Image (tube, rainbow, N blue to C red):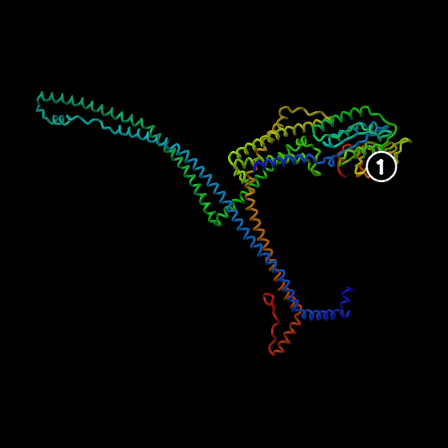
Amino acid sequence: MMKRAFLASLLIVGLTVAVAGCVDSRSQAHAVYMLVDTSGTYAREAGKARLIINYLLGTLQPGDSLAVARVQSRSFSEKDIIAKAMFDTRPSQANAQKRAFRDKMDAYLKTVSGSAYTDITGGLIQGAEFLNETGAGKKTILIFSDMQEELDKVTIRNFPISLKNIRVIAVNVTKLSTDNIDPRRYLGRLEDWQKRVEGAGASEWKVINDLERLDAIFAKS
Amino acid sequence: MTDLQSWMIWPDNTALSVLVLLLIAMIGLYAARTPMHGLIRATGHALGGPLRLGARWFFAAATELKERNKAVLLAQGRRETGQRIEREFERVGILVTRDLQGYPVLQRRLLEVITRIEEDYKKCGEVPPPPPDWVEAVAAVAQIKTGGGEVVQKILDEIRQSVERIHDKALGEYRRAFEERHDILEGSQPFWRSIDKILKQVDRKMTGLQESAATVDAQMEKYRQIAAKTDEAGTILSNSAFTQFNIAVIVLMVALGGAFVNFKLIALPMSEMVGAGDYITASLRASEVAALVIILVEASMGLFLMESLRITHLFPRIATLNERTRRRMIWISLVLLVTLAGIEAALALMRDMLIADKQALLQSLAATQHAASEGWIGRIPTAGQMVLGFILPFALAFVAVPLESFLHSARTVGGSLLVDLFRALGFVLRVLGNLARHMSRILLHLYDLLIVLPLLAEQLVRSLRSGEAPVKAHPVDASGEL
């Protein structure tokens, strides 16, 4: 009788461990989609983009997702995703994936070339699609750009978009030469983006220009 | 202000208005005196009665609980003392069996030695041969007067010489005989020492037995006191329970510290097994829960091991298991514990490897120089973690002992605290009950104070009617009755 109780307790413990392993993990996972502007003169900032990607790789946990996509003349396409990974829940495997991701990004950033136009909106729509597919609990879009959108005449982006429950963070928003003449242009540009993003249902809008304070990416406002 | 004005009978004459109002109120209060007194008294009783009843219940419950605590404590003490006496008797039994087994040999040796000594003694007692009979003849010859004759002189000289020779010979024999006796005595010295040693051995064993007997006596006295349910026994047991409780709490805190270190060692590597991205709640990872479960399983195995070894007695069913099943249980628990300890050591190693891998990744991401290899010094923490990982489960196994003490003493400590709490509550309720009763009396007096003028008038009227001296107003007695 006692032995039976003893074995039953072992079974219960085993089941507890098994059940613990079956809990849905996605709700606690973090998915990050980073848009890297490669248009015009901003392509020269690619080195800083590497810094941010490395920070993300060092900070994201096993089970999180990361995708890096370029912003080109038309960015609403899977082809613009340079690298993406859903990190394994095992830390050792996740580290290996991160190394492979870093190598892939290093290879790309060496050969980055500028595009004629800048389709940030298309990138945002693509990013939202990717993030929603991951099913992660926390979703963040990082926009590494000067936030100056330039579209050709054919491309249509002036329609409402949905960024529901997604945090949008603009990183390294450099000032254009015209911004230096009239800072209101820069401030107005950021304000316009904030309105658009918040209007699209984003949970947060943030601008981080100091790359020494990248920890603010994951900090709650 | 306007509200006040509306109450004035003569708004222009506030003083008169207030006076008239007071008089009206006084008459109204006087008219309602009897029912108001009844109401106040009833309220006092309604409040004070249940409160005093509650206080009585609490005091009665405290007394009953104290008795129950004492009964439980004495039963526990009787069981523990009984077990101690049993163990002491077992010890005495083992001691007696061991020593008595050796006693026949010891006795034989002692008898042999004594026989030998007796023989030697007898040998020593052998008297050397007495002097020859002719000694008397020599004495007689010595009395012969020579008379100056040469022949006689010569004979006597020869006799003297002959006697001296015989004397020397006899003396030599005497000396030899004494030398032999000395040799015998010298030879019996080791036997004396042997006797001394044997007797000391016996003395030591007897002292041990006496000490055990004294311990048994003390325990028996304690048992007798417990059986007699004396207050002294209850106090001693209660104090002992409090001490045990404090010690058990301290040791359990230390064990909790050990468990925390253990948890830290295996929480990270457990994520390799159950995944780092799985969450039970918003902040509780499945890997952390799994690590906790592993530690709890280790503690449980330790508990079963201690139970099976009969060191603790938390599960009566295990204590009553037959010897064969009990031994099986010991082996199963021990094997599982060793396996878990091995797993922990491996996890500790994996933890170190994971941290190193993560560090290497971060260094490569930061594009900084790799830290120089620390050689064998760098392996010390790894080895330390592995050793800790292996040892901590066994250390945790012993938590069963303080846990048992804690559980047993917690009953007494908790019971005592509950008794104190009941008494405190009873005291508070009694105070509140008395306060309610006294407040009702104060209110009665206060009420009469407000209608003092009508009461005086009443007294006057009564005294005039009866034609006697004015009587005092109906006082309110100590119990609040008129």
- The type of residue carrying mark 1 is Ile
- In this view, the residue in front, B380 or B314, is B314
Instruction: Please tell me which residue is depicted at 66% across the width and 24% down the height of the picture.
Output: B373
Find residue B95 and report its horizontal and vertical position in percent.
42, 35
- Res. A63 image quadrant: top right
In the rendered image, which quarter is residue A26 located in?
top right
Residue that extends furthest to the right in the rendered view of this protein: A153
Asked if residue B237 lies left or right of residue B463, the reply is: left
Residue B476, given in percent of the width and then of the height, sits at 61, 68
| Residue in the image at 58% along x and 49% along y | B418
Does dot 1 land on a helix, a strand or a loop? loop
- Please state if B57 lies on the left or on the right of B86 as rendered: right
Quarter in which the N terminus of chain A is drawn: top right
Q: Nearer the viewer, residue A219 or A132?
A: A132
List the residue tagged with mark 1.
Answer: A161
Q: Is residue B388 visible?
A: no
Q: Position of residue A165 (x, y in %)?
A: 79, 38
Which quadrant, please, contains the C terminus of chain A? top right
Q: Quadrant of residue A85?
A: top right
Counting every numbered tag in the picture gives: 1
- Relative depth, front residue between B239 and B179: B239
State which chain disc 1 sits on.
A
In the rendered image of this protein, does residue B427 appear above or below residue B26?
above
